[in-house]
Structure formats: C-alpha cells, structure tokens
Image: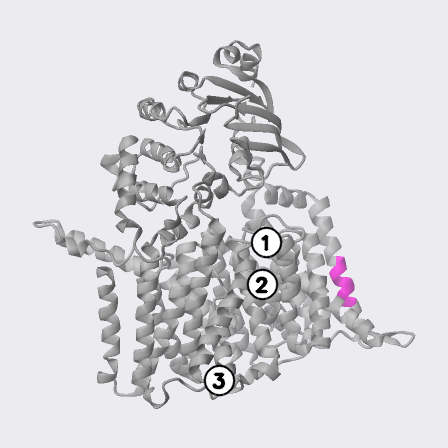
Amino acid sequence: MAFWASQSLNSLALGGLLFMLAAGFSLIFGLMRVANLAHGALFMLGAYVGLASVQAGLNFWLAALLAALAVGVVGGLIERFLLRRLQGRTLPQVLLTLGLAFIIADACLMVWGGDPMRLPPPEELRGAVRLGDLAFPRYRLFVMGASCAIGIGLWLLIERTRIGAMIRAAVDDMQMARAIGISASALFSAVFCLGAALAGLGGVLGGPILSVYPGLDADMLPLALLVVILGGAGSLLGAFIGAYLIGFVYTFGQALVPDLAYVILFLPMVAVLAIAPNGLFGRRLS
Amino acid sequence: MRRFIPFMIALGLVALLPLVSPSDFYINLASQAAIAALMALGLNILVGYAGLTSLGHAAFPGIAAYLVAWLSTRGGLGPGPAAVLAVAGTFLVAGLFGLLALRATGLGFVMITMALCQIVWGGAYRWTSLTGGDNGLSGVPRPFGDMLTPTTFLWLCLIVLAVAIIQIGRFAESPLGVALRGTRDQPRRMSALGYDVWRIRFVAWLVAASWGAVAGLLYAWYHQFVSPHMLAVTASAEVLLMVVAGGAGTLAGPLLGAALVVLLKNLASIWIDRWVMLLGATFVFIVLIMPDGLAPGLMHLRERFRKRMASPTIAPPLAGQERIDG
Amino acid sequence: MAEQALEVANLSKIFGGLPAVNGISLSIAPGERHLLLGPNGAGKTTFFNLLCGDLKPTQGSVRLFGEEIIGLPPQKRAAKGLGRTYQILTLFPQETIRRNVMIALNGLRPGKWGFWSALDNNEDLAAEADALLERVGMSDIAGRVVSQTSYGDRRRLEIALALALSPRVLLLDEPLAGLSREERVTVQRLLDTLPRETTILLIEHDMDVALAFAERVTLLHHGTLVATGSRAEIAADPRTREIYLGA
C-alpha cells in the first residue's frame, strides 16, 4: 500500500514536471510548426540558473522566478534572431534547435562542471504530510499542485483572453489570422518566450526531485517528445494527459522493472500510434 | 557504371594510405570515416531521397553492434554467424520501428525516430544484466583472426563502402529510387499514379537500416567494444550532420560529410575537448550559412568555373558534362 | 440499365460540422463527357478528392464500372482505371518531362519496384513516353527539366501524366487554370484528342471551352447537387444563372 501510494505521488510529481516541459513544446509546435529540440536544454538551463541563484543566497522562489525569466529571455533571443531567419522552413529550424541544444548543454557542462548537484527544496516545503501510515513528501505534493495551477492558468490564457483568442486563431489558420490583423511576429515571440520560461521553471521545480546534472536535458527531452506524440501536438489537454501517463508508466517502470523502465515507454507509444497516429488529441503531426 | 569511377579512384587512393602513413593513427582515422560514411549513405536514403529526416539513425548501427557483441561474447557464437544474426535481428527491429515511425512524416517523423532511438539507448543503458550498462560490452572478437591488421581492416571497410556506393548509387537512378524521390516531392500524385507511397517509404527505411546494421558490425569490430554512447542523441545527430553538411540527396555529399565530421571530431578531441559544443555550432553554421551542404556548393563552383573556361573557343568534351550525381 | 462508368450515391464529406459535399448522387455513362459547374467553394475539388481517394467520405458510395471503390486507397483506384489531374500543378519539378512521363507510365507496372537498372535505361518505357509526348505535342521539349518549362507546357504535362495510365475514367480539375488565351488553345486541342471511349469528368470555369467539350453538365452549390442534365437543359435552367450571377 505504502509503495503504491508513494510511487503514485512520485508519478504525479514527474507528470507535473513533464507537463511544464511538454506544454511549452506543444504550444510552440502548434503555433509555429517548430519542434524545439532545445527544449530539454532550456529545462536544464533553468535548473542550473535556479541552483546558481540559490547558491548565491537567493531564496528558492526568487531563484525560480529569476530562472524562468532568464530562460524566457534566452528563448526570446533564439526566436527573434535565429529561428525567425528560417521562418517557414521546418527542417532547418529543427536542425537549428538541435544545434542550440548541444551548445546550451555543453555550455552548462563548462560552467557548472560534471558532478550532479542537488537543489534543496524551500524550507517551508521540507518534510512530509502524514496520512495515517502514509507519508507524502510535501514538495512533491506542491509540484503536482503547481503543475495543475499552471495548466489551469494556461487554459484560461488560451480560452479566456484576447491573446489566447489570437493564438487559437493562428493555430487554426495562420493566413486567416494575419488577414484579420493578428501580428504573427509578436505572437510567435510571446509564445516562444512563454514556452521557454515554462521549461526553465520546470527545471528549477524539478531540481529538488531529479537533481541537476549534465544529461538532464537528454533525459527529459525524449520524455517530453513521447508526451507530445501521445497527447498530440498543439493540444494543451493532450500534453496534460500525456504527461501524467508517461509520469506513471516511467515511475512505476523504474520501481518495478528498473532494467526495462525505458523500454516499457515503448508500449504506450505503440498503442497510441497504432490507433491515433496524430496523438490522442492532436491534429496532423506532419 | 561510369559515374562510379571517381568514387572508386577516391577509395583506391584511401586504400593506399597505409603506404605513406607514418603511424596507425591515420589508417584508423580512415577506417572510422569509412564506417561513418556507411551510416551517412544509409541515412541519406531517408533524408535526401525520401525527404524523411530521422533523428534516430544511430539505433540501427547501435542495435547491430550490440547484437554482434553480445552473440559473439556471451552468446558463444563465432563472429560470422553472430554477424548474420545481428543484421537479421536489426532488420526485424527496423521493420517494427518503421511501422511506427512511418505513421507520420515531417516533424512527427523526426520526433518519433528520436524517441525510438532514445528508448533503445535507455534499454542499453539500464538493462545492465544484458548489456553491461554504461560499461558496455568489451572484448568483441573480430572475424578473419590474425589477418585483420589496421591496414587490412581499412581495406575491409573500403570494400564494403564501395559495395554500398554502387548499390545506393544504382538505387537512386532505378525506378524505385526515382519513385522514392517522387514520394518526397508529390506524394499525392504518386498514389494517384498507382504507387503505394507507404510501401515505397518502408522499403527505403529498410534499406537505410540495413546499411546502418552493416556499419554497426564494422563499428563493433573496429572498437571491439560497444557502449550506450553509440546510441545517444549526439550519435544520431552526428550522422545527420554528415548528410546535411555534405549535401542531402547526392551520392558524394554523405561521403564528404562523413570524412569531414570524423576529422573535425578527432581534431576537436585533441585541441579543444568541446566536441558537443562544436557539433552544435556546426549545425547552426550549416543551417544559417550553407543550407544545401558542401557537395552542391562545390558543384556550383565547378559549374561556374567550367563555364568561364569553356566560353571562349571550344565546348567542353561530353564526358566532362557528367555530373557527380543528380 | 447499362453499367455506368461512375455511379455516385449519397456521397458526403463533412469538415468540422460543415458539409463540403452534401449527399451527392450522380451517374455518368461510359464515354460521357461531363462538366461540373459551380462557384468557388461549391465542393467540386472535394468531390474529386473523394472520388480518387485522397479524402475519406463521411458517407456514401462510389462505383467504378459497377465496383465499389470507397475504402480503397488512391493507388488501388488508379489501378482500377481512375486517373486525375490537379488544379494546382502536381509535377516532379526536378526531373525532365520525359522522366515525369516515365514515372507515370511505371505506376501500374511491376517494374516500378526495380532497384538495380537505371530507369532511363529502360528503352521500351522511354519509347512509350516519347510516343505519349508526341501525342500531346511535347516531343520537342521532352529532355527539358520541368522547372525550366513554361506554365502552358506544365499544364499539358499535368494532363499527360494522367493519360499515361490510360484511365477508363479521367477527372480533370481546371485544366485551363491560369493559362493565357494562346496557351488555352494548345490545351484545348489536347483535350480534343482524348480517346472517345474515355469517360471524362471536368471542372472548368472557362465556359466557352467547357460547354463545347461536355455533353452533360451538373451544377453544384454549397456542396449540394442543384441540377444535372444535358448541356442545353442546364444552360436554360434559371438556377444556373442565379447561382453564377448571385454568387
């Protein structure tokens, strides 16, 4: 019982982190038709910036905010000065983000070295909540709640605000959106910044759980890709459900059959691609 | 067959390298480049001819190398039977992966191939009892016993590479190869003309995987060691860089790209020790500055040069008109 | 009743709640030349895409010479004798005109799976391609790469590719789109040489050419079949005028 409960909480926490990562990826994909392969590296960069800020004496929450902002700015620069030059050319854009992923990852290795480091959770979230015999780490509960809050926030942003309406219009039909006066340029920058900032925030919030190490990017990106393949690109709901699905499969896989934790990820992918090649909630991936 | 002559001359010259090389270092470098070229030629079938960008091509050499290593060390088979089984096994896995990856094209294909390769990587890394985990499998026995010196190993690689160049070169001009390019440019028209687009892509995928598997065998024999590194994202990215940097959709491009990337990687490891950074920077550079790759770029230069030479008096001889490849 | 070349029954395609093609039923006799009329957005091209298999219908049936083809992929329909052209040119731009035709000729032959001998070395196929190009009046430019030919030549090649399959039923989607007056004449001449036994379904906005070509006409509006009949009947139908002038 205790095993199942604690592993379920771990799954939910991992799912929450994956959602923060995949939501941005999926939004960017849906709007700009860019598969941002630097997303894992941005997640890791966020974790490192958060860690460095905490080590410099900043409090955890400020460090998280700072990391999200910093990574958002990096994302904005990438969009404005590099991706934009290749607008509409899908393949070169993918290669560019891949190249940037390597550069960012190696730069992190250069600056922060190769040893794994642990980002301590904030004081007020240490320890566990007791429920009868079961103990739930507070921090993981928080991460789960935070990801749900972010999910609801994003949903409100997209469904209930003016900018959200513009995003939806542009995802549906770019030309039509341009015709009614939506500035694609500003929208692209805004969404790319937002997606990058979410990845950066995810990195900081993930730090206390996953710890921070070189290769964190390469561990997280494929999971995010799986989330998007399962949930369907461009769908917030798809990212949410996909993230928790992968969170559960991976966490329980690691606990029950550690040797095959990765190989098990193959199963949901086979199942979904067999039934719905565009993902559970997606439009065409191509 | 005439268009293969320049390639064969080039390979012949590389085969003579042991005569002038002061140490085994350069001979081994040439072997590495030949193995890399084999992978790049295979991937080019997908990227260049089929228009399907795979970011998981390392899966095929990786699976084949692991299989041959496992079968010939723990499995107790001789290198020959192990090699045959390894290629057959890779072929089967490739068939399964193809069923999944070819559900999509474009970016979906990129994402699925990348995820598939990462799953294989995870398996190699985690399934320690079978794969040795991060330590990999070492002591892979080579075929042909004592006959394989650095020099003869290079020759073996070059012979295999020559076969690949001829097979893929002929494939590219064959009805199936032309149809494959047709599915890249006009998939709807191709099916309206009676072609089964999916099946053509699947065949191309299997051909690419098979050459990847052969490269994996040579890789395992060359290093006598396999580890999860050969399945990492960087490994797939390196092969893709060879294709894109050299020029996708040409026969000479992947060869040129492979030579270049292997050279760059070795030089980088000597001087700056920041290969991943350099790899990333090269991607950014190629995409922004030279999107068509080296081979087409050089061809344009050659055309321009020839035009300047030819214009005043006589037309160039017909043989000279032959292009490296279309 | 004799077997129809094309028998469409209650064919519909609904995109996100909006019917693009709405319950169309239509019979076309063998050898008939049939014109589809209707303003932009009437669902004509969607109708073609349903016939050739690029789109899956929401409901309905299509019989080609008595045989149900809904559910078959496009390449199987091509094998059963259904050919088509596209309103937006759909050619192989980096290949020569001859090679374009050779690719098309090969589509229904087992030789298309050959992976060793060069396509260009197949002399029988090249000769056949040249014969077809002769027929459409393009022999003189057979060796030219498509991207270096004129728009009018490409329009004719678009038709030639469909002809390479010797289709029993041919769907022509605006074969004159974007052509100048002189170019129209060459394509019109090509249309006149099409074999009489080929059943042809045509979408075309150039009324002079289209009405001279077609014997029967169907009028579509908002995805629905408004009227179908002989050339004279449709021309006299007040709804034709209303839809065209009102739109």
- The residue tagged with tag 3: helix, strand or loop? loop
Q: Is residue C145 magenta?
A: no
Q: Nearer the viewer, residue C42 or A144?
A: C42
Q: Residues within 10 Å of mark 3 (few under 14, many from 20)?
A: some
Label 1 amino acid?
A: Ile
Outermost residue toward the bottom in this view = B146
Q: Is residue A250 left or right of residue B29?
A: right
User: Are the residues under marks 3 and 2 on the same chain?
Assistant: no
For the question of whether residue A256 can be seen, the reply is: yes
Label drawn at residue A28: 1
Provide the residue span drawn in magenta: A142-149
Q: Position of residue B228 (x, y in %)?
A: 53, 78
Q: Residues within 10 Å of mark 2 (few under 14, many from 20)?
A: many
Q: Chain of mark 2?
A: A
| Quarter where residue C220 is shown | top right
The residues bearing labels 1 and 2 have C-alpha atoms spaced at a distance of: 10 Å
User: Are the residues under marks 3 and 1 on the same chain?
Assistant: no
Q: Chain of mark 3?
A: B
Q: Position of residue A195 (x, y in %)?
A: 62, 57
Label drawn at residue B77: 3
Q: Which residue is mark 2?
A: A39
| Quarter where residue C150 is shown | top left
Q: Nearer the viewer, mark 3 or mark 1?
A: 3
Contact check, label 1 and label 2, Cβ < 8 Å:
yes
Q: Earlier in the sequence, mark 1 or mark 2?
A: 1
Label 3 amino acid?
A: Leu
- The residue tagged with tag 2: helix, strand or loop? helix
Q: Residue at x 52, y 59 (%)?
A: B110
- The residue tagged with tag 1: helix, strand or loop? helix
Q: Nearer the viewer, mark 3 or mark 2?
A: 3
Contact check, label 3 and label 1, Cβ < 8 Å:
no
Q: Residue at x 58, y 41 (%)?
A: C71
